[in-house]
Amino acid sequence: MSSFFVVNIRARDILSANQIIENTETIVSASGEFELGFFSPGSSKNLYLSIRYKKAGGIIVWVANTETPLTDASGTLAFSSKGTLEIINGTNSTIWSSNSSKSLINPVAQLLDTGNLVIRTENDHDLGHFFWQSFDFPGNTFLPGMKLGKNLATGLDWSYNSWKSNDDPSHGNFQIKLGISGYPQLILWNGSDKYIRLGPWNGVTWSAIPNSGPNNIFFDKFIFQEEEIYYEYEPIYDSMLIRIALEPDGRIIRYSWTNQGNKWEPTIFLQADYCDEYARCGAFGSCNVNSLCRCLDGFQPHNVEVWHSLNFSDGCIPKTQLNCSNRDDFVLQLKTKLPDTKGSSYNFNMNLEECKKKCQENCSCIAYANTNITGTGSGCLLWFGDLYDIRDQEQSLHDFYVRVVASGSGSTTSSSTRRIILVVLFPLISISTVVLGFYLRHLCKTRKKRKTEGLLCVQQYPEDRPNMSSVLVMLTSKVSLPQPKQPGFFTERKLDEAYPSSSFRLTDAVKIPPQITVRAMSSDSGYSSQVK
């Protein structure tokens, strides 16, 4: 513990080198929004050096000694002789330190209106000259102005960890961090396993959560520089209080403070469903919450029997093996979550056509897409090897293209087979068409002949009707038949009135008994008329 002369403080935003915080004492940001002191989360009796909202519900947003709580009120916060902040317990042991690599003369700790606790030299008020800041060591809460990403120069990893419970701020099971192996993408981890992949930044939002784009609450920024890559957000209005929390159960929730209700209103930013869990459908498989899994266009189940038993872990394989040809096709995948970008490569200066050409030239390249979807799209993202963690996503605006064998450029065996089938089928189809034509013509002639025979046999006058020997000849041979005269009957209602398109007219009146049906036929018209 520091041997400096100690002066107790209250309700100030700065802790100087000769001051301490103990027991119920706190320092408060200039705006009165945030407060630093020893607090107990939830129903816990343990004490933690914490930053919390002073006015907005007392919610804790940062904890220093997450793994080493104070079990009594004997703890103090003070500067060491090297200028680092330390928490000292009742046995005079240091249980937490800010671990600054540099020794400072006349250091001060200041709680800013952003909720950031910073250490600087007393006379240096430049906001960029911090020797240490709490924002570099996030907990479970992502505040405006904080970063989510990585500093490639210093190695700082701005990732967020869930609490074990609402009463225990030690590290829980879940962590959200930016993966930078390949094109950077946001990943929620459950222990050592990828749990949910939120995808890469597409110029508007994270590709796997398209409904989290522009809104009337905050605006996003994704910074991609040589030394650091990170995401941050800011409220549209300075008066708005918003925070994003990684809950103990893995949910990511955005909270907004409402003065009217005097409470935090939650909006679920991310909550996993069946298809959100990582690589649910294996390689080249796409998950759908309704039909479970499907293979991408141009692919088929690796093991059909296992696939149909609803075990999708084997994934899919190409229907025809790729032959590394410049004639390979690329199938557009619409409304689909981008695959895992681990191991991918990217170039921000290429357009989509150049990107396709780059992929065609590399036998290992299996897919490509723009990196940025704004405007007409820009940049080039290339995948190599199997594609994992894909799902159908109706709101997705980030399409990608998957390599498949071009039509007609399959294996020699399959091409030969197709040629044999075509050679055999075409003659068969031609012969069948000719035979069918002859049959239909014969059928029509036969039907017309039968009608003519029937009309000849029902003529009104005997001399117009054939005798029995003539009937036998008509039925058993192909002799030419005379054209019959008009049928020898008609009704009081003329058939030409009922069927104006008929080619015959009935003019002689004949009485037809009731309940008797007579069918009048014309050998020319093809009509058949019932009269009762």
Image (tube, rainbow, N blue to C red):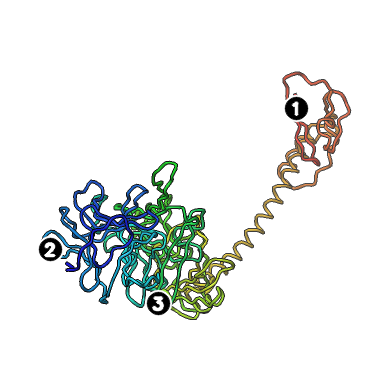
Q: Nearer the viewer, residue 476 or 345?
A: 345
What is the distance, in whole Å, between disc 3 and disc 2 at their CAs? 40 Å
Q: Is residue 529 above or below residue 398?
A: above
Q: Residues within 10 Å of mark 3 (few under 14, many from 20)?
A: few
The kind of residue on which mark 1 rests is Val
Are the residues flagged by discs 1 and 2 in contact, CB closer than 8 Å? no
Q: Position of residue 366 (x, y in %)?
A: 45, 73
Q: Residue visible at 38% across and 54% down?
A: 33
Q: Quadrant of residue 436 in the image?
A: bottom right
Q: Position of residue 97 (x, y in %)?
A: 22, 67
| Place of residue 29 in the rendered image (x, y in percent of width and height, measured from the top left) | 36, 58
Which tag is nearer the camera, tag 3 or tag 2? 2
Marks 1/3: CA distance? Answer: 100 Å
Q: Amino acid at mark 2?
A: Asn
In the rendered structure, which disc, 1 or 3, sits on the residue that comes first in sequence? 3
Mark 3: which amino acid? Answer: Glu
State the residue position of label 2. Answer: 92
Q: Is 455 in front, or is 101?
A: 101
Asked which secondary structure carries label 3, the reply is loop
Q: Which residue is mark 3?
A: 227
Task: Give the farthest residue toward the bottom.
Answer: 361
| Label 2 Cα crowd, 10 Å radius (few <14 / some 14-19 / many 20+) | few
Which mark sits nearer the N-terminus, 3 or 2? 2
Element class at badge 2:
loop
Residue farthest to the top, as pictured: 514
Quadrant where the image shows the N terminus: bottom left
Q: Which residue is mark 1?
A: 518
The answer to whether any part of residue 280 appears in the image is no
Q: Which residue is nearer to you in this view: 251 or 15?
A: 15
Mark 1 or 2: in front is 2
Q: Is 133 left or right of 430, judged from the image as shown?
A: left
Q: Secondary structure at mark 1?
A: strand
